[in-house]
């Protein structure tokens, strides 16, 4: 409906609906913490700080699978609301397929500041990947991206590599951690420091 701004819950539900081959999603329940880049700005680039940067979130991380029928916008929102204090809900890129096998949803976390200029440039860069339909969401301090075309494991790694070449836009630390984990994660819910639920700012075709 015109005038209604879609959010991250809506986009994830739409990706699942648009891909009948998806059998299940994986959600990540994790502890809200301080961004490493903020820590580095406060503490400086000491060896101790750099070593911290090699680690992923130190809090307890809980992975939960949900079937495609459970991946509605409303249900995802309810799951997020049920979490304990200082917990956030994220969605993993890796999905299980009907009949076996897996694939990835194209996801990326950017670090450029929200602005008209950055949004235009970022949209052009993503369109240059020729992935077809997608969404850019404003996350508060930057942007998130979701593509609607599923990627094989090899294509997912190529996608991450291409994004890494988007100097000044893509979050290189995010890409490094996702390669170590074997899947991408984007935040769905809001929290004390992450005050807004990511909202769709641009639809890509």
Image (cartoon, rainbow, N blue to C red):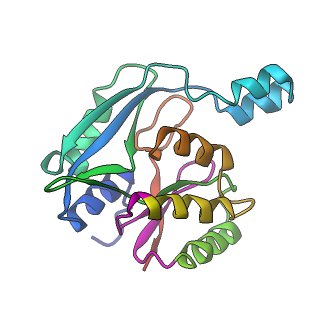
Q: Which residue appears at 59% of the width and 48% of the height? A: 175
52 lies left or right of 23: right
Q: Is 165 rendered above or below residue 142?
A: below
Q: Which residue appears at 42% of the width and 78% of the height? A: 132
Q: Which residues are magenta?
A: 130-153
Q: Is 4 rendered above or below residue 193?
A: below
Q: Position of residue 179 (x, y in %)?
A: 54, 45
Q: In the depicted view, which residue is nearer to us: 171 or 141? A: 171
Q: Which residue appears at 42% of the width and 69% of the height? A: 134
Q: Position of residue 7 (x, y in %)?
A: 38, 55
User: Which image quadrant: the C terminus?
Assistant: bottom left
**Based on the displayed image, in which of its 4 quarters is residue 79 positioned?**
top left
Give the tally of numbered discs: 0
Does the stretch in magenta take in 172?
no
**Based on the displayed image, in which of its 4 quarters is residue 63 positioned?**
top left
Does the stretch in magenta take in 144?
yes
User: Which image quadrant: the N terminus?
Assistant: bottom left
50 lies left or right of 200: right
Q: Position of residue 155 (x, y in %)?
A: 46, 65
Q: Which residue appears at 37% of the width and 44% of the height? A: 91
Q: Position of residue 17 (x, y in %)?
A: 21, 63
């Amino acid at each position: 409906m015109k005038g209604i701004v879609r959010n991250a819950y809506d986009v994830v539900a739409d990706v699942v609906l648009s891909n009948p081959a998806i059998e299940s999603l994986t959600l990540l329940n994790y502890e809200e913490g301080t961004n490493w880049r903020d820590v580095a700005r406060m503490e400086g680039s000491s060896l101790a700080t750099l070593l911290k940067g090699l680690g992923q979130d130190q809090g307890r991380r809980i992975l939960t699978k949900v079937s495609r029928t459970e991946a509605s916008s409303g249900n995802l929102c309810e799951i997020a609301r049920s979490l304990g204090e200082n917990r956030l809900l994220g969605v993993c890129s890796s999905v299980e397929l009907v009949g076996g096998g897996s694939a990835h949803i194209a996801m990326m976390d950017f670090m450029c500041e929200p602005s008209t200029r950055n949004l235009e440039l970022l949209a052009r860069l993503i369109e240059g990947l020729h992935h077809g339909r997608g969404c850019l969401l404003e996350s508060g301090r930057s942007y998130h991206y979701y593509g609607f075309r599923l990627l094989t494991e090899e294509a997912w790694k190529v996608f991450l590599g291409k994004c890494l070449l988007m100097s000044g836009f893509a979050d290189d630390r995010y890409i490094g951690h996702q390669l170590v984990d074997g899947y991408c994660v984007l935040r769905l819910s809001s929290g004390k420091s992450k005050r807004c639920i990511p909202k769709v700012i641009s639809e890509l075709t």
